[in-house]
């Protein structure tokens, strides 16, 4: 993952656990980024989420369509992982990503709102895999936008989409308005109170 985000465990392991409450076991959490734009703020929003999860002692893997598998997911999907037959060669990145998703206890989807809906880069990456790898696991919605609503309309669409995949989202959401404004996030993904929260 570029910038300050950790690479997905396709190339490196997750960080060691930090101190967490003995009553709350650490969760294997996959953060899925949605922005594929060259100039984007998504890596900073993602880093903020990762830092908060780290504080609670959870294992975190980030899947970023721009960087995971050297940008494999930047190409429009032509064949889903589950459509490969037994005798066919499956791209290794698909097997590796499927293993990461299967091992997850939960998911957090971090995406900008694009044209009042879900970023296509996110659904392109997630649609490679069927509901079998997502189902019966909770998910969280984290959206952001340049405007004042923080991706709320995208969040509505994500509820239906994630529900169809079987990873029902929890009721609480993270919505960051004015994510591109100076002072919203610093280079390390720290949330600045001077931004548009």
Image (cartoon, rainbow, N blue to C red):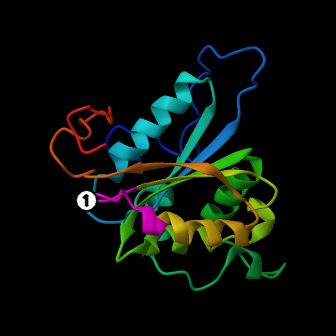
Residue 83, by quadrant, is: bottom right
Q: Residue at x 81, y 82 (%)?
A: 85
Is residue 6 something one can see in this rendering? no
122 over 30 or under it: above or below? below
Residue 90, by quadrant, is: bottom right
Q: Residue 142 placed where, x, y %? A: 48, 52
- Membership of 108 in magenta stretch: no
- Which SS does the magenta portion mostly show? loop
Is residue 190 something one can see in this rendering? yes
Q: Residue at x 53, y 74 (%)?
A: 124
Circle 1 sits in a helix, a strand or a loop, which is it?
Answer: loop
Position of 108 with respect to 72 (left or right) is right
Q: Residue 176 placed where, x, y %? A: 36, 49
Q: Residue at x 41, y 47 (%)?
A: 1
Residue situated furthest left in the rendering: 182
- Membership of 147 in magenta stretch: yes
Position of 180 with respect to 87 (left or right) is left
Part of the protein shown in magenta: 144-154
Of 167 and 50, which appears nearest the observer? 167
Of 93 and 113, which appears nearest the observer? 113
Q: Which residue is mark 1?
A: 146
Q: Residue 180 placed where, x, y %? A: 22, 52
Q: Residue at x 55, y 32 (%)?
A: 53
Q: Residue 121 placed where, x, y %? A: 45, 71
């Amino acid at each position: 993952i570029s910038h300050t985000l950790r690479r997905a465990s396709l190339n490196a392991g997750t960080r060691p656990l930090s101190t967490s409450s003995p009553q709350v076991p650490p969760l294997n959490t996959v953060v899925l980024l949605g922005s594929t734009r060259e100039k984007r703020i998504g890596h900073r929003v993602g880093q903020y989420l990762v830092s908060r999860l780290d504080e609670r002692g959870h294992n975190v893997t980030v899947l970023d369509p721009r960087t995971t598998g050297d940008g494999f997911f930047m190409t429009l999907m032509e064949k889903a992982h589950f459509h490969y037959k037994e005798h066919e060669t499956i791209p290794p990145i698909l097997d590796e990503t499927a293993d990461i998703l299967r091992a997850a206890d939960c998911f957090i989807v971090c995406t900008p709102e694009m044209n009042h809906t879900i970023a296509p880069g996110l659904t392109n990456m997630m649609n490679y895999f069927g509901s079998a790898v997502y189902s019966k696991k909770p998910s969280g919605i984290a959206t952001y936008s340049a405007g004042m609503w923080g991706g709320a309309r995208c969040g509505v669409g994500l509820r239906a989409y994630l529900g169809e995949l079987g990873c029902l989202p929890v009721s609480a959401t993270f919505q960051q308005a004015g994510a591109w404004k100076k002072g919203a996030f610093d280079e390390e993904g720290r949330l600045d109170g001077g931004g548009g929260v």
